[in-house]
């Protein structure tokens, strides 16, 4: 198979198997591999140790035979290797096959043995078969032009090795089994939190209810998965809050839209029977209809603005607050000719610069100025101040009207909240909610407080 094909197959395998199976298989494979390798290594160690003992005996037998019969002629020296308990059998092999009297000898003679006899090769050990029995043979140099071959039956050693092999195979098999059990256990316990996490996520996806939470273990027993679950819970909290906020906004909006829409419909129905109205009545109804339409349009626009969350990144720029305040004051003067708007900028131009969206900041200031003009009697001034006290720049808007009653102060930034005294004036109670939202999106704080000497004071701190 090509490398790409194998990779594709691997990917498909990973996709098909659940993580738990994959982890179990990986752990099993790793532990099983170690068990098999250790058993194989043990087998080779045991085998070489057993043969080493046999080889030692062969060396001793060869030395004894050489001492007993130094310089013997080619031929059988000792023993027949026929019995298990028999001492080593020994033969003298000449370098020249023509001078070999044995036809055939007891021990097999390899060409290598002739080379040892001739002194061209180092002594060596071999496995041989003597009369149908396994044996081990040492071929070593002896006298000039002759080699000595000594053999010992290896049955016991072979039996020992076979037995050891069986035991090791059994051990390896048990190891693999244990590995499988371990793998299963590790994957089960290791992935239990992940399983819980997945179940919760699936439940949320199925019910679309972000109130679910993942159970966390008692503190002090946290691990990576618990931290993940914690982050997941935090995310769910945020999601729940956002969903609740959206639902509340929609509920509030539909509630607030009902009244103006009903009025709109009444006027529209009235105008549909225009033939039965006097010209003045028709005039009044159509004027009211136009006004109500503008109100509803404004309300809907405000709602759309409120529903928007963050400032879109690309629109953010360095906004110089001085010119922005001047511009907003200019707009307010045009809108409320009876109200003198006074601006005092007490900040170095370079200090009063903030990152933001100019249109949105104008909207914020516009809403504050609008309120100040709307809720204070004509003729009394509205004062706007830009300062840089310490840290960030600060903009204040104050008027000399009735001010905000202490019991209303905590609620003026709520959507659709309008103090009792304000209900007679046009408005929907969205202006300050929007202002605060814009302020927060710009990392600023907007607060209301009673102004010293009467009136309301709004403070915007960046
Ligand atoms: N400068 C102020 N002086 C007195 N009361 C104020 C002032 N500004 C706001 N308020 C009170 O806070 C309420 C909420 O203000 P907000 O701007 O959110 O709504 P609104 O001006 O009534 O309507 P909208 O701004 O949507 O046209 C007002 O209804 C009013 O009771
Ligand atoms: Mg307002």
Image (cartoon, rainbow, N blue to C red):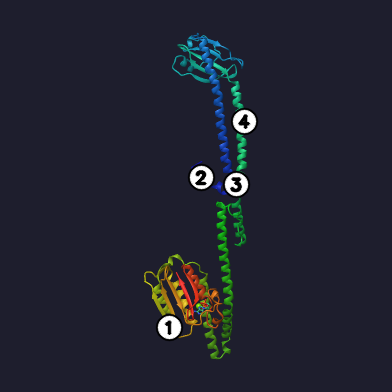
**Relative to 315, 229 lies left or right:** right
In this rendered view, identify the residue nearer to me: 274 or 133. 133
Q: What residue would you read off at disc 4?
A: 167
Which residue is disc 3 drawn over? 187
Q: Are the two marked residues, 1 and 3, in contact with CB atoms closer than 8 angstroms?
A: no
Q: Residues within 10 Å of mark 2 (few under 14, many from 20)?
A: few
The residue under label 2 is 7
Whether the residues at callouts 3 and 4 have beta carbons within 8 Å, the answer is no
Q: Residue at the location (48% across, 75% down)?
A: 458
CA–CA distance in space, label 2 to label 1: 77 Å
Crowding around mark 4 (Cα neighbors within 10 Å: few <14, some 14 to 19, many 20+) is: some
Comparing labels 1 and 3, the label whose residue is closer to the camera: 1
> Distance between the Cα atoms at labels 3 and 2?
24 Å
Task: Give the structural element (helix, strand or loop) at label 3.
Answer: helix
Q: Earlier in the sequence, mark 2 or mark 1?
A: 2
Look at the image and tell me whether residue 90 can be seen: yes
Q: Answer yes or no: do the residues labelled 4 and 1 have beta carbons within 8 Å?
A: no
Q: In whole angstroms, how far apart are the C-alphas of marks 2 and 4? A: 38 Å
Q: Which of marks 1 and 3 is nearer the N terminus?
A: 3
Above or below residue 43? Residue 417 is below
- The location of residue 446, given as percent across then percent down, is 48, 72
Say if 21 sits above or below 401 in the image.
above
| Circle 1 residues within 10 Å: few <14, some 14–19, many ≥20 | some
């Amino acid at each position: 198979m090509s490398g790409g094909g194998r990779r594709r197959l691997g990917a498909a395998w990973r996709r098909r198997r659940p993580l738990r199976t994959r982890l179990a298989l990986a752990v099993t494979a790793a532990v099983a591999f170690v068990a098999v390798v250790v058993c194989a290594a043990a087998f080779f160690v045991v085998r070489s140790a057993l043969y080493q003992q046999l080889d030692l005996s062969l060396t001793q037998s060869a030395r004894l035979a050489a001492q007993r019969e130094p310089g013997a002629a080619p031929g059988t020296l000792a023993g027949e290797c026929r019995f298990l308990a028999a001492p080593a059998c020994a033969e003298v092999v000449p370098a020249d096959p023509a001078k070999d009297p044995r036809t055939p000898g007891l021990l097999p003679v390899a060409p290598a043995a002739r080379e040892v006899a001739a002194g061209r090769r180092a002594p060596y050990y071999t496995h041989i078969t003597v009369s149908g029995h396994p044996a081990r043979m040492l071929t070593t140099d002896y006298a000039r032009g002759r080699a000595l071959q000594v053999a010992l039956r290896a049955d016991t050693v072979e039996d020992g090795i076979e037995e050891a092999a069986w035991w090791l195979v059994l051990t390896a098999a048990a190891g693999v089994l244990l590995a499988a059990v371990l793998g299963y256990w590790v994957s089960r316990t290791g992935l239990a939190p992940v399983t819980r996490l997945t179940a919760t996520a699936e439940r949320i996806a199925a019910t679309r209810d972000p109130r679910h939470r993942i159970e966390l273990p008692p503190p002090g027993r946290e691990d990576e998965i618990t931290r993940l679950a914690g982050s997941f819970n935090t995310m769910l909290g945020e999601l729940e809050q956002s969903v609740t906020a959206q639902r509340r906004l929609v509920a509030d909006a539909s509630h607030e839209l009902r009244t103006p829409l009903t009025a709109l419909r009444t006027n529209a129905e009235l105008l549909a029977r225009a033939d039965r109205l006097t010209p003045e009545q028709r005039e009044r109804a159509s004027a009211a209809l136009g006004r109500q339409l503008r109100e509803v349009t404004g309300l809907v626009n405000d709602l759309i603005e409120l529903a928007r969350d963050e400032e879109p990144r690309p629109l953010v720029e360095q906004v110089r607050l001085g010119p922005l305040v001047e511009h907003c004051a200019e707009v307010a003067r045009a809108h409320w000719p009876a109200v003198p708007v006074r601006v005092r900028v007490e900040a170095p131009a370079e200090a009063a610069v903030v990152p933001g969206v100019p249109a949105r900041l104008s909207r914020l200031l516009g809403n504050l100025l609008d309120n100040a003009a709307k809720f204070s009697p004509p003729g009394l001034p509205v004062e706007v101040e830009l300062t840089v006290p310490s840290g960030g720049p600060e903009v204040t808007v104050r008027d000399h009207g009735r001010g905000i009653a202490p019991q209303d102060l905590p609620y003026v930034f709520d959507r659709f909240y309008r103090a009792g005294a304000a209900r007679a004036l046009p408005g929907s109670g969205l202006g300050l909610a929007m202002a605060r939202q814009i302020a927060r999106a710009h990392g600023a704080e907007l607060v209301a407080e009673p102004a010293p000497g009467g009136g309301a004071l709004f403070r915007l701190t960046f």
